[in-house]
Amino acid sequence: MPAIGPKQAGRQRWKVRSAAVIRQPRRSLGWRAALLALSSPNCPLRAWRDGSHARRISTVNAWTFILPAVAGAGVSAWGAFHPRSQLFGPTVHWADNACALTFDDGPNPQVTTRLLSLLEKHEVPATFFVLGKYVREYPSLASEIVARKHCIGNHTYAHPSLLLLSRQRIIDELNRCEDAVFQATAVRTACVRPPFGFRGPQFYPAARRAGFSKIVMWSVNGWDWNPQPACRVSRRLEKVQQGDIVLLHDGDHRASNADRRHMLEALEYWLPRWKNRGLQFVSFG
Ligand SMILES: [Zn+2]
């Protein structure tokens, strides 16, 4: 092979460099600077390039959905479960210048007659939110409630949770209870209380469609639906004052002969004391 001179060697090197430049993609000065910056370990863009930035963005995006969803669920739960919520329609939860005793889930042959006698003794009117299935079973108890000048309210026929029932199913439940009450007492009810106090957005329109003008909730809960020492119920009733609607149970939606002696004993204690304090009582007609 013939030896090459310095001139030829220089030309050869130039050709090799030119080929390398041609093989590489041509990059502007700005692009090269960006690549250099990106390769720096301190570059914030590196986190983005590695995916951690993407993770942060996706976390932020997730929270922007989760937080409103949690807040919305909380507001809806409050609207559906809290007795004083007005979110899904107006309710009565305050008795203005008087106090209202309400008794749910009866009539109950073990309790209702004794309760009526107790109320009569202290001349206190009350409202009984009855279940249609027990009115059918004990119509004479329902008519006794009316005969003693108390009011009857509709608490559905079988005490289902109305939260997820369709509007028509709710109307059917209310109408079945209404039919049972009317057959037993010849009286139409004007107020309604949803079982467990649960109501969704469809409840108020359904109640209006079924002809009810008042949805009556409560402000004091006796938490008396399970057998317990009477002193516990009594302690819960200690705070009753003018304006309160008190929720108590003479019946039990799970059994028609429920034991409610604890509630009767607590009332026996409080009725004379409430009267001595000057509390006035009303019922919801
Ligand atoms: Zn109930």
Image: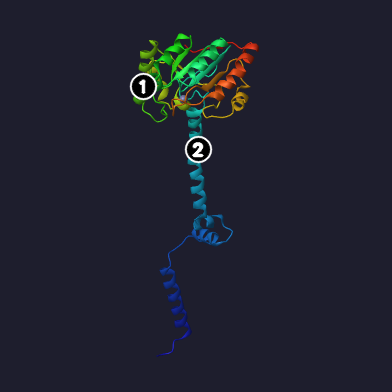
Q: Nearer the viewer, residue 189 or 3?
A: 189
**Count of picture labels:** 2
Q: Amino acid at mark 1?
A: Ile
Q: Which residue does the image show at 38% across and 29% down from the upper left?
A: 165
Q: Decide if residue 216 is in sight here.
A: no
Along the polypeptide, which appears first: circle 1 or circle 2? 2
> Which residue position is annotated with label 1?
171
Nearer the observer: mark 1 or 2; the answer is 1
Q: Quadrant of residue 168?
A: top left
Q: Position of residue 142 (x, y in %)?
A: 43, 15
Q: Amino acid at mark 2?
A: Val
Q: Dot 2: few (<14), some (14–19), or many (≥20) neighbours within 10 Å?
A: few
Q: Decide if residue 234 is in sight here.
A: yes
Q: CA distance from mark 1 to mark 2?
A: 31 Å
Q: Position of residue 154 (x, y in %)?
A: 42, 18
Q: In the current view of this chain or complex, which residue is farthest to the bottom?
A: 1
Q: Position of residue 239 (x, y in %)?
A: 63, 21
Q: In the current view of this chain or complex, which residue is farthest to the right?
A: 277
Q: Secondary structure at mark 2?
A: helix
Q: Position of residue 29 (x, y in %)?
A: 50, 60
Q: Quadrant of residue 37?
A: bottom right
Q: Which residue does the image show at 60% across and 27% down from the upper left?
A: 232
